[in-house]
Amino acid sequence: MVTIKEIAKRSGYSQATVSRLLNGDPTLSVKEETRRRIIQASEELGYAMQTKHVAIPREVAVLDVIDPGDHLQDAYFNELRDVLRQSGESQNMHLTFYTDVSRLIDHADRYDGFLAIGAEVIDAGLLRKLHEVLPYGVFLDTNLAPNLFDSVQPDLSQTVLDALDECSAAGMRRVGFIGGVGRIMGEHEFPEDLRLLAFENWSRRLRFDTEGLIYIDGPFTVSSGQRLGERIIGDLHGDLPDAFIVAADVLAVGVLQAFNAVGVIVPRDVSLISINDQPIAQYTSPPLSSYAIDQHELARTAIFTLAEAIASRRTVRHHVLLSTTLVERGSFVRS
């Protein structure tokens, strides 16, 4: 059994200092070199694995690759950035934000590890270089390099299954899907994202009628959603399904705009159930029923996943999936 006394002896600092640091005392002020030596000594002796006590890393970089546009999709990642900053502060973690991977690589020796947010594609070669100099990192919401870094993501496949179960419970059998072009995993890019793959799989197994009811076009933006809504109106000529599952609120907003423009009334003519539960979902007409992604839990889990990886020095990657919760509003009604 490794003791505080042994860690103090190995690191060269007092037992009181070691105890306060490892127990996360917010009033303790020590030099970065002191903190690193104590944590290194505790890791070498196996203290974290023995006690399940993981010291939160103090110096952490944030790879912030959010496209600085003004779309609602960007708003989701902007909110996630703010939540991550708040979570880091609550854990006495100092976060430094980088928008350029090469610059982070140049300054990697300053940090214990990194967290990454955003949906922009990063060159695979740069990610490999980043891993060489900063091997411990966690991607939030995405999974750009699953063989190199950990990730924490909402379980979107389960969310789609949950939405289909809601449709089934409401007696709906003819259900469509509205989505955008997505990235499957790592370097593999396909027109289908995980939500569409889950929809195609589970709707077939559950014997829903989806023929001619899958609509995919371009990025996750309001304008893409509006174009898809217009295509649906033109293709189906009023023969709308019981419901559409929409891959993200940002698309659903555009779909509602297209439907409202021609007098299609939601949920009277067709129900909509969406994913993300962004603030805008409360203010559409009608308000969107949407699956909420708990960003605070995403950030908290990412921080502790990073801390555990550093403490244990593990090389096996962990990919954590978090459940979502349906927030019921006016666009989806159980008849």
Image (cartoon, rainbow, N blue to C red):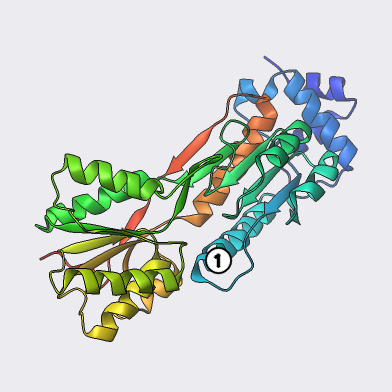
Residue shown at the point (75%, 36%) measured from the top left: 129
Q: Is residue 224 left or right of residue 236?
A: right
- Displayed quadrant of residue 243: bottom left
Q: Residue furthest top?
A: 1
Rendered location of residue 256, percent (x, y): 31, 76
Q: Residue furthest front?
A: 235
For the question of whether residue 323 can be seen, the reply is no
Camera-side residue of 251 and 302? 251
Disc 1 marks a residue whose amino acid type is Asp
Rendered location of residue 211, percent (x, y): 17, 54
Residue shown at the point (34%, 55%) measured from the top left: 325
Q: Is residue 315 left or right of residue 25?
A: left
* Quarter of the image where the C terminus is located: bottom left
Residue shown at the point (39%, 48%) measured from the top left: 192
* Quarter of the image where the N terminus is located: top right
Residue shown at the point (74%, 18%) measured from the top left: 45
Label 1's element?
A: helix
- Displayed quadrant of residue 239: bottom left
Camera-side residue of 143 and 219? 219
Q: Which residue is mark 1?
A: 74
Q: Is residue 261 left or right of residue 279?
A: left
Rendered location of residue 183, percent (x, y): 49, 47
Few, some or many C-alpha atoms within 10 Å of disc 1 (few <14, some 14-19, many ≥20)? Answer: some
